[in-house]
Amino acid sequence: MKGALIGCGFFAQNQLHAWRDMDGVEIVALCDQNDERLRQCADDFAISRTYTDAAEMFAAGGFDFVDIATTAPSHRPLVTLAAEAGVHIICQKPFAETLADARAMVSAAASAGKTLMVHENFRWQSPIQAALQVVASGAIGDPFFGRFSFRSGYDVFSGQPYLAEGSRFIIEDLGIHILDIARAFLGDAHQISATTRRVNPNIKGEDVATMLLTHKGGATSVVDCSYATRRTPETFPQTLIEIDGTEGTLVLDAGYRLTVTGQISQSRDVAPPVLPWAQRPWHNIQESVLTIQQHFVTCLANGQIPATSGADNLQTLALVEAAYLSAAEGRTVSLADL
Ligand code: NAD
Ligand code: 89V
């Protein structure tokens, strides 16, 4: 299977390493508007076909899928080009800046008959997958409460300076992952209420968000995120989880310890491996990049719809939009109203 990648920035390095690790997949073309980044990436990964204009790359063709690793404002034009070119698409989160853009992209890929997956990788982290398997096994019964918590003081702005510049920050960039994890455990939500605040005076958007979700299956969850929390140990980029079920509880604690209390109780280390090209503390995220890309290729090979498809991601994006609306208007927002 041949692929092309657009956006040779900070995070694409992980995606390129992961593609290189996978059997039967080759990235044959690279595109970035920034010529210097493009050349550096082409050298580092020995990829000879390079473009500064995505339309030219699609016109030249010769690949089955495109990996869009740019930031959200460029996603709709690039996904539209890809659908018109008739290639499968994997696109980074946040999938879109608006729900209207996201819906248009889902519809463009569907009309072209091509797979569209969002690179929503947090639920693919191996500690999260281990916890999901426990819940799916029925070991804690029917979950009725969840807490999904990401609190850190890690400096994310040095690697991703744009995160300090947008009027939206933590819900759109990080909360989106944690809301998606809440959906993976407890199913879709139908209402949300949220509060936000900015603690760091050097950024424009909110760096703290606390959200309360009502899930369609009846469970309630709290999703709390902060980049203004100085703590020991520093847990970046771990999502800490508590799930209460009718037959027991599950806790994913700091340091990747998974404890299940129920008919059979156990506590085990579910720390992710550090891949040869990975660096702590990012190794957890980096491993999930490999896993989600493997999932994409498996789905293409078997004609399956990816778990984090564009259509699925509309539900996560709706939670993001609803959380901002709730925080701005001080009320609970029903997702059906968006
Ligand atoms: P970045 O700014 O470092 O890189 C983006 C690159 O895309 C830049 O080099 C830019 O020149 C290029 N680009 C933008 N528009 C383009 C276009 N139309 N055609 C060609 N090139 C174009 O950004 P980043 O930090 O790598 O983030 C990229 C995306 O990855 C963001 O959406 C971010 O939220 C996401 N991200 C995801 C994770 C994760 O775990 N899933 C982690 C970090 C970042
Ligand atoms: O995963 C992400 O989307 C990153 C970070 C972990 C820094 O929030 O932007």
Image (tube, grey):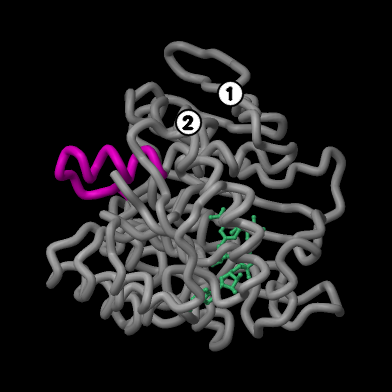
Residue occupied by mark 1: 270
* Mark closer to the observer (2, 1): 1
Q: Is mark 2 within 8 Å of ligand 1?
A: no
Q: Is residue 149 above or below residue 251?
A: below
- Residue contact between numbered discs 2 and 1, judged by CB atoms under 8 Å: yes
Residue in front for this viewpoint, 34 or 231: 34
Q: Is residue 271 above or below residue 199?
A: above
- Label 1 SS: loop
Inspect the magenta stretch and tell me whether residue 305 lies in it: yes
Horizontal placement of 148 versus 120: left or right?
Answer: right
Could you tell me residue 42's position as x and y percent?
Answer: 57, 56
Mark with earlier residue (2, 1): 2
The quadrant in which residue 196 appears is bottom right
Q: Quadrant of the C terminus?
A: bottom left
Who's the residue at 41% across and 82% down the image? Answer: 98
Label 2 sits on what residue type? Ala
Q: Which residues are magenta?
A: 293-307
**Residue 93 shows up from this direction:** no
Who's the residue at 49% across and 39% down the image? Answer: 20
Residue in front for this viewpoint, 197 or 124: 124
Residue occupied by mark 2: 131
Using the numbered discs, state the Cα–Cα distance from disc 2 to disc 1 in whole angstroms: 9 Å
Who's the residue at 48% across and 61% down the image? Answer: 30
Inspect the magenta stretch and tell me whether residue 321 lies in it: no
